[in-house]
Image: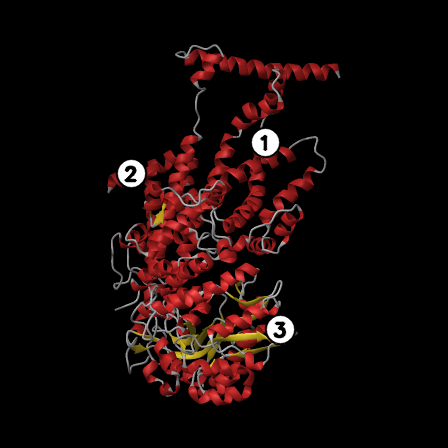
Amino acid sequence: MTSATARVPVRRHMAGIRRGQAASGYLFTAPAVIVLVVFLVIPIFMALWVSFSDWGGRGSPFASGVHFVGLKNYGALTGGGGLAEQDFGTALRNNLWFVILVVPTQTVIALLLAVLVNNRILKGRGFFRTAFYFPSVTSSVAITVLWYFLFNPTGAVNQLLGAVGLHGPNWPADASGVLHDLLSLVGLRTGPGFLVNGSFLGVTWWDWLSGPSVGMMIIITMVVFTTSGTFMLLFIAALQNLSQEVEEAAMVDGATAWQRFRLVTLPQLRTTLFTVLTLGLIGTWQVFDQVFVGSQGDPGKTTLTPAYLSYVAGFQNQDWGQAAAIAFILFAIIVFFTLVQRWVLRERGVSRRRMRRNGFDRNDSGEYAAADRLLTAAAVAGAVQNRDSSGGSL
Amino acid sequence: MQRRTTRIAAGIAAAASVLALTACGSGFSGSGSSGSTASGGTGGLTSSKSALTVLIGSSGDAETAAVKSAVADWSQTSGTKATVQAASNLPQQLSQGFAAKKPADVFYLGSDTFASYAKQGDLLAYGDQLKNKSDYYPSLVTNFTYQGRFTCAPKDFSTLQLEINTDMWKAAGLTDSDVPTTWDQLATVAKKLTKGKVAGLVTSNEYQRLGAFMVQAGGNLTNDANTKSTVDSAANVKALTYVQDGLKAGWWKFTKDVGAGWGGEAFGKQEAAMTIEGNWIAGAMTTDYPKVHYKVVPLPAGPAGKGTLQFTNCWGIAADSKNQAAALKLVEQLTTAKDQLAFAKAFGVMPSIQSAASDWKSAFPQFAPFLDAASYAKGVPTSVGSADVVTDLNSKMAALKTADIKSLLATEQKNLSAVVPG
């Protein structure tokens, strides 16, 4: 008692003017934290529980009538040979091809557009920036409806193809895989036995290798069209942050435009590249709007995606456990690919091959690093000096 | 100091989340006790003074207005307040209501999805308490029977028949006596009608259309009582082979192949001389394609006689409704001949009770074939999970022209037997 009363004033005194700062900090962040916890963290844990339960959508998932069923919901998706497994396998196959095509394409196009509109010589840069960004701010539902209109068998796309003498496919109804179509051009119509007979998640290996369907190409082009603008904006912001001096130093060193882009600009964009690829990866694994509005999984279930499948399982079939299980498998997939991508894009030293080429001893990374610093400093200084002198001459 | 503040903050966060959880808990289960006591009981319906909510999946303003006025009339005579909401996404809004234990009291429910709600105990099985129980078409009652209990009152129904573009019909030199009554005759007239961009017959590739031919051949996906999967029956093979022959010969086309969303669109744009749709086509033809002249005739008979598919909705009542007694009275009112005929006039549905049939036919003589089909039409599978199987079948039938019918049906037989009880 006495010690407590004696200690408190001392503490107060010691805390001084900063007393209560931390508490205020927590107080100010509390609204945001509470909102996050209530609307995000708790629902996520509820969903996790639902994925292990037999909850049927009536009342609370924590009510007494709801039972723990272990991995039953996950098991139905990953084994058992039923329709659920086959649908899930098909959805994963479709989405995998979707990601493989969309993520690199949209990143490359976004970077290209950013470099183009960041060009100082370009007239009307503002106009182009707005034009390229416009699809991103338009409602995805509106664009989906429009896109399916364009890709109608008698629509604008096929009219254009017809004008150059090509006979366009019936886009929204063509369930054949693009890769299979290409293989059939060289006469390979059915796969080799080991691919046709073996299967994973109810889908044969041959069908895993089908590529996106012609119908899926509609959604692929649409998503590339809409998201490239968004990511272009990120790249523009990053490009404007790059220091002009390094670029000019490279110019002084005699680097060509392509070398400057590949060896000077691109490595400096690594963090932005990581952001764009991660956002792209997450967005493409969760593709839903376009499927929900445009195709509903048609043609032939080739635009079925896990996100849409989860919606159907929950809201149409009232199979909430399975819907939640799909969502969590999807979550695991996204986390996995993000980690892989992070590992691929990690900071690395210069390869040994390049060190040898530049005349450094492979075992002496310290000397290389020192030399590198020196060279960079010299280059920057050179560039500054160069600019000073050119400024002087003017 | 630093450590202590962290601990306090953690305590606040924990308290907040516990509060939030309990708040959720009360929202989910607190109000449930009043409704669940009587759920599924034969006699004890909940009764209170609370107002009723009616949730409908409306086809448009005409339907919403008609239901609103019928419900308002009932409110006036019964003294119980009731509001009608047109859902923008019915399954989603229903699910949200059930999960919160605050569902709409009365709502539309399709025959293909009602079983999954019934399985979860969302629905009050009130069918046996309806005063006009015996007046409903027996096949509709079968459609809404879950585990031997007549669950909800059929709201209305529709059937498929053949629509013919009369101008094209005359141009091809055909007369009334040429109206097809057999599969062979259908093929003959369709070939005559196929010219240039016009296909003789255009339908969607769904079971919901092609299934009519399965019935005509004596098959269907399940038996009539929905207790046994019969997908791979010889009759179904015969039916799909007939369709496949038509596709190969070119007089039958799928809507996707002509770039139409449904049969009515191809028919309205005059890319099809004939199509197979239900009575809902009447509204679309009047509003979107008023210049196209057409008539409705019965589908031709197959090897096993006449056959078609029927589709229906029911008036669901929630097990968690606080005023089930009033909800039941409302449903009884909404399914009377008077109200159903008013709905028929407003948005073209067919009454679910037999006593309204003659009045409906005299009001809409040109659509009589749709109602005549009530005696021989078959329903679609209703058991939990069958909707997925039908979706899978539909996706495969898109390629029916080149498909191996027997193996296609064998796969779906496997899938459907997994979900059909018994």
Kindly identify which numbered label has been placed on residue B172: 3
Q: Quadrant of residue B102?
A: bottom left
Residue at mark 2: chain: A
Q: Amino acid at mark 1?
A: Leu
Q: Amino acid at mark 2?
A: Ala
Of B229 and B105, the residue lying toward us: B229
Percent coordinates x, y for residue B146 in the rendering? 31, 74
* Residues at discs 3 and 1 both on one chain: no
Q: Mark 2: which secondary structure? A: helix
Name the front one of labels 2 and 3.
3
Query: How was the colour assigned to the protein in this rendering?
Result: secondary structure
Q: Which residue is mark 2?
A: A6
Q: Mark 1: which secondary structure? A: helix
Residues marked 2 and 1 touching at CB (< 8 Å): no
Quick check: can you spot residue B287? yes
Q: Quadrant of the N terminus of chain A?
A: top left
Q: Amino acid at mark 3?
A: Ala
Circle 3: is it few (<14), some (14-19), or many (20+) Cα within 10 Å?
some
Percent coordinates x, y for residue A289 in the rendering? 50, 54
Residues marked 3 and 1 touching at CB (< 8 Å): no
Percent coordinates x, y for residue A126 in the rendering? 68, 40
